[in-house]
Amino acid sequence: MSGSPEKEVVERFAAAWERTDYGAMYRELDPGSRRSLSEDEFAAAYRDAAEVATLRELELGEVGDPSERDGATVVPVEAEVGTAAFGPFEAELELPVSAEGVAWGPSHVLPGLRAGERVENDVELAPRAPILARDGTPLAEGPAEAREHPIGSAAIDVTGEVGMPEEEDLPEFARRGFPPGTPVGISGLEEAFDARLAGRPGGQLLAVDEATGASRTLAQAEPRPGAPLKTTVDPELQETAVAALAGRLGGIAVLDTRSGNVRALAGQAFSAPRPPGSTFKLVTTTAALQEGAVSLDDEFEISDGINVGGRFIYNANGEFCGGTFTEAFAHSCNAVFAPLGPEVGNDKLVEVAERFGFNSSPTLYAADAVREMELPEASIPTEIGSELDLGVSAIGQGEVLATPLQMATVAQTIANDGVRNPTSLVLNRKLRPDAEPVRVMTADLADQITELMVGVVVGGTGTAG
């Protein structure tokens, strides 16, 4: 121990401040200070000062010996302060103290303030960086308050938008140096990489005399411009995808078959999982062929549906279909696919779906950004349930949920000789997903399923006519 009651009080106060334990700090105040404001008011004063200062770190160093000044005992504390917007600065804090505790005043909320001063800031925002297509075409550019999209609104489905943050997020943005009223990224890439695009604000951190309004500078720094974000998007494909969707509910995802990179996203391409319907039959087909539950030459009765687990499941629009498995696939025949669910079984169906990317976060960019955005997952229950549930799941209904991006990933895997690649939306190396490619099936099986898919558009349900 220091041997000085006053010094010990300040040591405890300083240690609590470093760990932002405002309750412990408040307990070190003398009785008169505690009568003058509540613990909540005390904590609010420190939080407000930290917000104005964009306080990042506070290191209170050596606590000095007590001395007399103007009839009061003061104890000096050395401080190193780090701020987000104004850089670091060093200051000395002098706390008036007695054996009963700290004689607290409003100027004690930040090292460097003198009695009768308050903390203010003069923020200078950095230029917001552009979001670029893979060929360098700007998708979004200009200041946050006047963001522009040179290829038109088609880019917004990828870039997202800039606007006012939610009220509960205002303190966090203030701590980063963005004053109230500053537009920030609120969706898409603008939100996911807001810190990168917005750069670091600068300006001056000021101590302002309450009586005269005169100010002095505690710290200052130049703003640091944001860094451009280069995407994998093809601007022509992006415009085409958005035009094809034409404002309808739904989504479109276009992937590079070899790299897995996103070339275009339109509408709710990855934001609203829904039952994928017959597109999930690609997953069922993969599982069934791997398990030996079916072969391409197997023959099936021509019918308008089938009983599975006590329920009759009809073909779409009540049509009759069957024949070889190849023909049944071309006509998306529920009467053939629904029984494959129970035959393949829960474990195999779920295993194959998960290798395709179900029950895991989309791999659009680095994992930290994905978690921050809380991107929804395509999902399948790990325990699907009854024979009927398995049959319904095998045709992409029930509790199976997927996005257009997920089903595009299924197609990419088949086109890439059975290997699923991450679906990166960004080219910047450090921002790309770190997921590894996953082999879902053999190249031979991928070729077989490719031929089945060709049959859909040549003479099945996918013909242009």
Image (cartoon, rainbow, N blue to C red):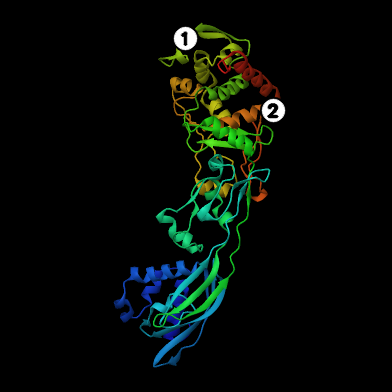
Q: x%, y% of residue 436?
A: 65, 40
Neighbor class of circle 2 (other Cα within 10 Å; few <14, some 14-19, many 20+) is: many
Q: x%, y% of residue 262?
A: 62, 38
Residue lying at the far top of the rendered structure: 302
Q: x%, y% of residue 138?
A: 62, 47
Q: Which residue is mark 1?
A: 304
201 in relation to 3, above or below: above
Q: Which mark is residue 209?
A: none
C-alpha distance separating marks 1 and 2: 34 Å
Q: Could you tell me which residue is drawn at 43 percent across and 75 percent down?
A: 109
Kind of residue at badge 1: Asp
Query: Looking at the rendering, which quadrant does residue 68 occupy?
Result: bottom left
Neighbor class of circle 1 (other Cα within 10 Å; few <14, some 14-19, many 20+) is: some
Q: x%, y% of residue 1?
A: 48, 82
Query: Looking at the rendering, which quadrant does residue 446 occupy?
Result: top right
Q: Which mark is residue 417?
A: 2
301 in relation to 36, above or below: above
Which is nearer the eye, 245 or 344?
245
Kind of residue at badge 2: Asp
Which is nearer the eye, 451 or 125?
125
Which is nearer the eye, 291 or 284?
284
Question: Is residue 97 something that shows in the picture?
Answer: yes
Q: Secondary structure at mark 1?
A: loop
Residue 303 as seen in the image, left or right of residue 439: left
84 in relation to 79, above or below: above
Residue lying at the far left of the rendered structure: 35
257 in relation to 43, above or below: above
Of labels 1 and 2, earlier in sequence is 1
Residue 112 as seen in the image, left or right of residue 430: left
Question: Is residue 405 something that shows in the picture?
Answer: no
